Image (cartoon, rainbow, N blue to C red):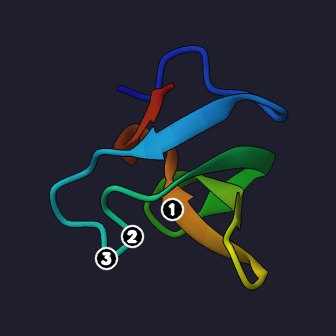
Amino acid sequence: MGDGIAAGVAVKVTGVSSTERGAQGVVKTIRPGWAGKEAVVVATGALRTREFTVPVVDLSRV
């Protein structure tokens, strides 16, 4: 988990402790966070687009 994750990559949140678990989207950017590297993920929905931040280790490529 977290391997090969970079900006523009389609991902799914697979981390057990993440509140966004199961969400899918595209990585907008990767930045340093309080628990290591974090990814800003953009997820498009039926009504709106949303952004959330999640640790890179909680992501898997789709």
- For the residue carrying disc 3, how many other residues have a C-alpha within 10 Å: few (<14), some (14-19), or many (20+)? few
Q: Nearer the viewer, residue 11 or 49?
A: 49
The disc label shown at residue 38, or none: none
Left or right: where does residue 22 sit relative to residue 61?
Answer: left
In this rendering, is residue 18 above or below 47? Answer: above
Query: What is the crowding at mark 2: few (fewer than 14 residues within 10 Å), some, or many (at least 20)?
Result: some
Q: For the point 72% across and 74% down, which residue is it?
A: 51
Q: In the rendering, at what x and y percent does residue 27 appear?
A: 73, 45
Tell me the mark number nearer the camera, choosing from 3 and 1: 3
In the rendering, at what x and y percent does residue 53 appear?
A: 60, 69
User: How many numbered circles does the render carry?
Assistant: 3
Asked whether the beta carbons under mark 2 and mark 3 sit within 8 Å of each other, the answer is yes
Considering only order in the chain, which callout, 1 or 2, is on the residue closer to the N terminus?
2
In the rendered structure, are the residues bearing label 2 and label 1 in contact, judged by CB atoms less than 8 Å apart? yes
**Residue 15, image x and y in percent?**
26, 50
C-alpha distance separating marks 2 and 3: 4 Å
Frontmost residue, 3 versus 8: 8
Report the residue marked by disc 3: 19
Please name the residue that numbered disc 1 is placed on.
Answer: 54
Q: Residue 20 carries which label?
A: 2
* CB-based contact (under 8 Å), mark 3 and mark 1: no
Q: Where is residue 10 in the image (x, y as percent from the top left)?
A: 66, 32
The amino acid sitting under disc 3 is Thr
